[in-house]
């Protein structure tokens, strides 16, 4: 079975941060996200991998990740 896509609200809750942080990380840090129409969708496993690779580290600059 494939992993479901989750919303901004769900990924913010999963990470324990605000929705604003999620949008900021999409724009400036390459949080792995896919835009479907007006909505952003996420795979929890991809986001967890990004966090473990220090993607959300505020001491780092723009990670230059891909945003689709």
Image (cartoon, rainbow, N blue to C red):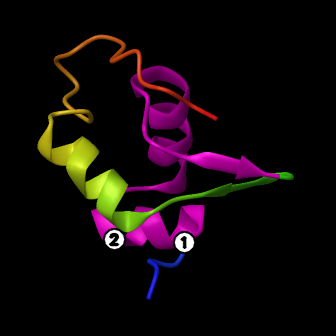
Residue at screen point 20% across, 15% down: 60
Residue 3 falls in which quadrant of the image?
A: bottom left
Residue 11 falls in which quadrant of the image?
A: bottom left
Q: Are marks 1 and 2 in contact (CB under 8 Å)?
A: yes
Q: Residue furthest top?
A: 61
- Residue 14 at x, y = what percent? 34, 71
| Vertical order, 1 against 53 (above or below) | below
Residue at screen point 13% across, 46% down: 52
- Residue 59 at x, y = what percent? 16, 18
Q: Main secondary structure of the magenta part?
A: helix
Q: Residue furthest front?
A: 1
| Residue highlighted by disc 2 | 14
Question: How many numbered discs?
Answer: 2
For mark 1, give the secondary structure. loop
- Residue 43 at x, y = what percent? 45, 63
- Residue 45 at x, y = what percent? 31, 63
| Vertical order, 23 against 55 (above or below) | below
Q: Quadrant of the N terminus?
A: bottom left
Q: Which residues are magenta?
A: 7-36
Task: Name the mark on residue 35.
Answer: none
Q: Residue furthest bottom?
A: 1
Spatial separation of the CA atoms under disc 1 and disc 2: 10 Å
Task: Name the mark on residue 6.
Answer: 1
| Vertical order, 27 against 32 (above or below) | above
Residue 9 horizontal side relative to residue 39, left or right: left
45, 39: nearer the viewer: 45
Residue at screen point 59% across, 68% down: 7
| Vertical order, 5 against 58 (above or below) | below
12, 35: nearer the viewer: 35
């Amino acid at each position: 079975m494939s992993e479901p896509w989750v919303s901004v609200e769900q990924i913010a809750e999963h990470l324990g941060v605000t929705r604003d942080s999620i949008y900021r990380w999409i724009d400036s840090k390459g949080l792995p996200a896919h835009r479907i129409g007006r909505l952003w969708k996420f795979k929890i496993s991809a986001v967890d991998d990004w966090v473990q690779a220090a993607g959300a580290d505020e001491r780092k600059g723009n990670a230059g990740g891909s945003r689709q």
